[in-house]
Image (cartoon, rainbow, N blue to C red):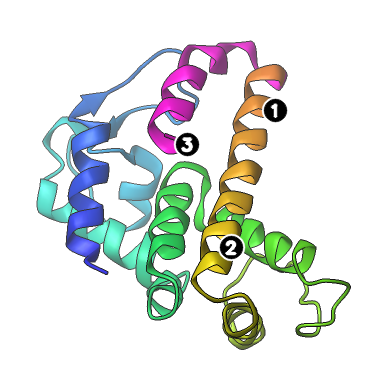
């Protein structure tokens, strides 16, 4: 799993500076919102946020802190999807999707004890993931990935239904993330 390649993909997709009126995230550069940049020490004009600083934020906040690097050791394609989902919806949402999918695919808690959906990748989530993969193998990773993508898609649709301004982004979100 090459986190640098994942970061490069996100930065290429998100592009440079944007401040779209329908985007509730406000001003962004390289896909990093002004609020996130400020929370992590950037004080300059968002139009000038260095790409290297954006990459460091992605690595620290959206890969290492939520524990997606640990997931990558066992399920790299799943970790890549969690990273992408975390960038767009927040790492806790992505972690919660994983936990919900693991529980839903757990055959009545027969493969491992169901885990709390606390939206954090900790020891219990990692043990559940490893048990799931031991039971289901490589095909299991694909099914788990599809379950996480389904949860992501449902959330995008709900966001557009709840806030009509989000309809401006719905097609792009789905095309880029579920394709």
Q: Which mark is residue 178?
A: 3
Q: Quadrant for the C terminus, please.
A: top left
- As drawn, the label of residue 95 is 2
Q: Residue 120: where, in percent of width, then height? A: 60, 71
Residue at 47 percent of width and 18 percent of height: 171
**Magenta-highlighted stretch: main secondary structure?**
helix
Work out whether residue 54 can be spotted.
no
Left/right placement of residue 48 relative to residue 133 reads: left
Q: Name which of mark 3 and mark 2 comes first in the sequence.
A: 2
Residue at (60, 31) in percent of width and height: 156
* Residue 139, placed above or below residue 44: below
| Image: magenta residue range | 162-179
**Callout 3: helix, strand or loop?**
loop
Q: Are marks 1 and 2 in contact (CB under 8 Å)?
A: no
Whether residue 44 appears in magenta in the rendering, the answer is no
Is 15 on the left or on the right of 21, as rendered?
A: left
Quadrant in which the N terminus is drawn: bottom left
Lower sequence index among marks 1 and 2: 2
Q: Secondary structure at mark 2?
A: helix
Q: How far is the residue under mark 1 from the one under mark 3?
A: 16 Å
Residue picked out by circle 1: 158
Looking at the picture, tell me which residue is in the foreground, 36 or 83. 83
Residue at image point 17% right, 49% down: 8
């Amino acid at each position: 799993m090459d986190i640098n390649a994942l970061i490069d993909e996100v930065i290429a997709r998100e592009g440079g500076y944007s401040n779209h009126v329908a985007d509730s995230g406000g001003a962004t550069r390289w896909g990093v919102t002004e609020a996130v940049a400020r929370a992590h020490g950037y004080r300059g004009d968002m139009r000038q946020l260095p790409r290297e600083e954006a990459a460091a934020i992605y690595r620290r906040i959206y890969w290492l802190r939520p524990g997606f690097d640990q997931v990558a050791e066992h399920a790299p394609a799943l970790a890549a999807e969690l990273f992408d989902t975390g960038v767009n919806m927040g790492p806790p949402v992505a972690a919660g999707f994983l936990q919900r999918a693991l529980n839903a695919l757990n055959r009545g808690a027969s493969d491992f004890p169901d885990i709390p959906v606390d939206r954090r990748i900790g020891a219990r989530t990692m043990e559940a993931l490893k048990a799931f993969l031991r039971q289901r193998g490589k095909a299991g990773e694909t099914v788990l990935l599809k379950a996480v993508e389904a949860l992501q898609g449902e959330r995008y649709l709900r966001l557009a239904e709840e806030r009509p301004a989000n309809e401006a982004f719905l097609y792009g979100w789905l095309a880029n993330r579920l394709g």
